[in-house]
């Protein structure tokens, strides 16, 4: 790739966009590590309140991130990226936003239902199922996202360096 082509493809996300991205990585990993293993754990009122606050904060920050990225940032994909690949990248990102949003909303739903004494039954089972499917979907989509990032790292097309602060190509 010539210097002119490299410069043209060297779109960089803002420092705030990078902070939001990597902050969500940390927040998501924290959520995975500290996850509730059994609904009965929510009998602990302090844990229930913490989970509700965590889910609400996660949701608000996710909305802030989505709005900020849509309004201020452009894709770092090179202009010559095939259309199907651009659509796949966009679909992947929207899918991650959707699954993360559903994780937060269903988590808050579980908390509300549990706090109202609805600890068993079809309703809470349905919300728990949505939560579990959303978490599994997020894992899958994040894995694809990481694989795509590594693919672009190997291509050295500027996509990797636009968001990753280390291991520059």
Image (cartoon, grey):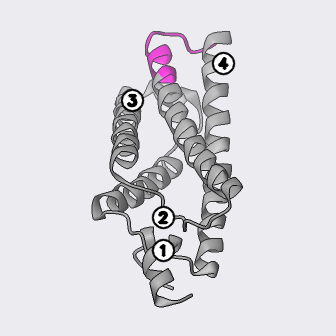
The reply to whether dot 1 and dot 2 touch (C-beta < 8 Å) is yes
**Magenta span includes 105:** no
Q: Is tag 1's residue or tag 3's residue first in the polypeptide sequence?
A: 1
**Magenta span includes 112:** yes
Pick out the residue farthest to the right. Answer: 84
Q: Position of residue 95 (x, y in %)?
A: 60, 42
Q: Is tag 4's residue or tag 1's residue first in the polypeptide sequence?
A: 1
**Label 1, label 3: how many angstroms apart (C-alpha)?**
42 Å
Local SS, label 2: loop
Q: Residue tagged by mark 1?
A: 9
Residue 50, quarter of picture: top left
Q: Residue tagged by mark 2?
A: 76
Say which residue appears at 55% left-offset and 36% top-offset: 98
Does any portion of residue 121 appear in the rendered image? Answer: no
Q: Is tag 3's residue or tag 4's residue first in the polypeptide sequence?
A: 3
Say which residue appears at 60% left-offset and 31% top-offset: 131
Q: For the magenta stretch, what is the residue range?
A: 109-121
Q: Residue tagged by mark 4?
A: 126
Local SS, label 4: helix
Local SS, label 3: helix
**Label 2, label 4: how many angstroms apart (C-alpha)?**
39 Å
């Amino acid at each position: 790739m010539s210097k002119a082509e490299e410069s043209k493809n060297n779109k960089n996300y803002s420092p705030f966009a990078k902070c939001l991205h990597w902050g969500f990585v940390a927040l998501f990993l924290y959520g995975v590590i500290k996850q509730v293993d059994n609904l009965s754990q929510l009998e602990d009122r302090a844990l229930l309140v913490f989970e509700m606050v965590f889910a609400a904060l996660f949701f608000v920050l996710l909305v802030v991130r989505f709005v900020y990225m849509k309004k201020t940032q452009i894709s770092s994909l090179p202009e010559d990226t095939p259309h199907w690949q651009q659509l796949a990248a966009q679909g992947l990102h929207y899918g991650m936003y959707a699954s993360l949003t559903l994780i937060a909303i269903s988590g808050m739903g579980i908390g509300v239902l549990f706090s109202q004494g609805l600890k068993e039954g079809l309703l809470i089972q349905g919300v728990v199922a949505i939560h579990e499917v959303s978490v599994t979907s997020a894992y899958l989509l994040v894995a694809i996202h990481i694989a795509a990032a590594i693919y672009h790292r190997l291509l050295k097309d500027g996509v990797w360096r636009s968001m990753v602060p280390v291991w520059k190509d």
